[in-house]
Image (cartoon, grey):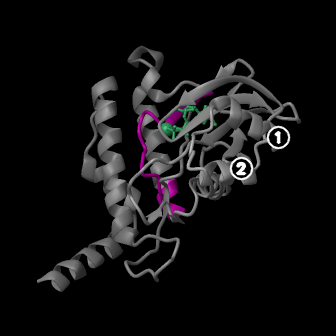
């Protein structure tokens, strides 16, 4: 029995133990996110991802969150710390909806299917032979024209920004390559932004210049990767301005206001 009540009880007895992969998968199967497990395809600090099939025979990826360990109190990814189980259930739900927003905005991301418990299921990028490789796993010789791959990555950032999202961890570790196309994954840290710096307290939107800083950080991990691995060099500011488009004026104005306010 792996319901919330049972877990909360473990909690009260002060036994906050992380779910094992088996327990998490048992819960995901109970919640009908998948019916058959092929294998674990990703093991991270915060989550693990498993490849399987659902009851419609679709290939799915199921991402399950682990207990969030931190001494940090307060708000994490917009969730208030109640029980650690409630926090990771909220993570699964939050990531599901960010993924859904991006999918509805027609970005090349997996189609999210369902969230339940500490997990959410999505389309597997790949096929019955398994998941697609990450960009970091592919060598220079794999691509006929690696600059086209960089263009695809920049287009994703451009379209995401148009949809008022910044990714926040946009790197070769979170980009998959399948069927000649780059796909983005991993959205818990992605942020939906406002077109101004004023957001009301408790708003799910982040201020515009914060999004701007996150985008800059994403570009400073993506562009050096292409330089390092594929010997492709592009002008950072040119790419940045291209992604910002018309919004650049608004950002410049907000940055000016910040300077005025602090002087
Ligand atoms: N939809 C998917 N299709 C194929 N592989 C995936 C999918 N989602 C995740 N993966 C694999 O699982 C790994 C971890 O997923 P990710 O969402 O990046 O989790 P983490 O937060 O642990 O980095 C990825 O690096 C990728 O190899
Ligand atoms: Mg990742």
Contact between labelled residues 2 and 1, with CB atoms less than 8 Å apart: yes
Please check the rendered image and state whether residue 1 is part of the magenta-colored stretch, yes or no.
no
- Residue for point 56% across, 46% down: 16
* Foreground residue among 142 and 90: 90
Q: For residue 171, what is the image quadrant?
A: top left
- Residue for point 56% across, 54% down: 84
Q: Position of residue 26 (x, y in %)?
A: 76, 34
- Residue for point 29% across, 77% down: 254
Whether 260 is drawn above or below 248: the answer is: below
* Foreground residue among 94 and 102: 94
Q: For residue 51, what is the image quadrant?
A: top right
136 with respect to 251 (left or right): right
Q: CA distance from mark 1 to mark 2?
A: 10 Å
Whether 252 is drawn above or below 92: the answer is: below
Q: Could you say which disc has been placed on residue 141 in the image? A: none
Quadrant (top left, top right, bottom left, bottom right) of the C terminus: bottom left
- Element type at marker 2? loop
Q: Which residue is mark 1?
A: 30
Some atom of ligand 1 lies within 8 Å of the CB belonging to the residue at label 1: no
- Element type at marker 1? helix
User: What is the magenta range?
Assistant: 159-180
Q: Position of residue 187 (x, y in %)?
A: 54, 49
Q: Which residue is mark 2?
A: 117
Q: Earlier in the sequence, mark 1 or mark 2?
A: 1
* Foreground residue among 33 and 151: 33
Report crowding for label 1: few under 14, some 14 to 19, many 20 or more residues within 10 A (C-alpha).
Answer: some
């Amino acid at each position: 029995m792996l319901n919330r009540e049972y877990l909360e009880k473990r909690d009260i007895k002060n036994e906050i133990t992380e779910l094992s992969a088996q327990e998490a998968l048992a819960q995901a199967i109970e919640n009908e996110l998948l019916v058959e497990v092929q294998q674990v395809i990703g093991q991270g600090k915060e989550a693990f991802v498993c490849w399987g099939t659902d009851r419609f025979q679709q290939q799915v990826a199921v991402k399950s969150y682990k207990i969030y360990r931190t001494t940090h109190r307060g708000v994490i990814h917009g969730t208030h710390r109640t029980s650690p189980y409630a926090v990771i259930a909220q993570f699964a739900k939050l990531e599901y909806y960010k993924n859904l927003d991006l999918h509805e905005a027609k970005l090349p991301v997996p189609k999210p299917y369902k969230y339940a418990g500490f997990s959410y299921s999505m389309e597997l990028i790949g096929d019955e032979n398994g998941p697609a490789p990450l960009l970091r796993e592919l060598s220079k010789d794999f691509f006929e024209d690696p600059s086209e791959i960089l263009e695809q990555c920049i287009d994703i950032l451009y379209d995401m920004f148009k949809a008022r999202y910044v990714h926040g961890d946009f790197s070769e570790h979170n980009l998959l390559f399948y069927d000649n196309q780059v796909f983005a994954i991993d959205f818990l840290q992605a942020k939906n932004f406002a077109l101004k710096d004023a957001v009301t307290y408790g708003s799910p939107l982040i201020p515009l210049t914060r999004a701007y800083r996150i985008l800059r950080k994403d570009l400073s991990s993506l562009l050096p990767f292409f330089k390092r691995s594929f010997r492709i060099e592009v002008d950072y500011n040119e790419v940045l301005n291209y992604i910002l488009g018309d919004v650049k004026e608004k950002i410049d104005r907000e940055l000016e206001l910040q300077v005025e306010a602090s002087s």
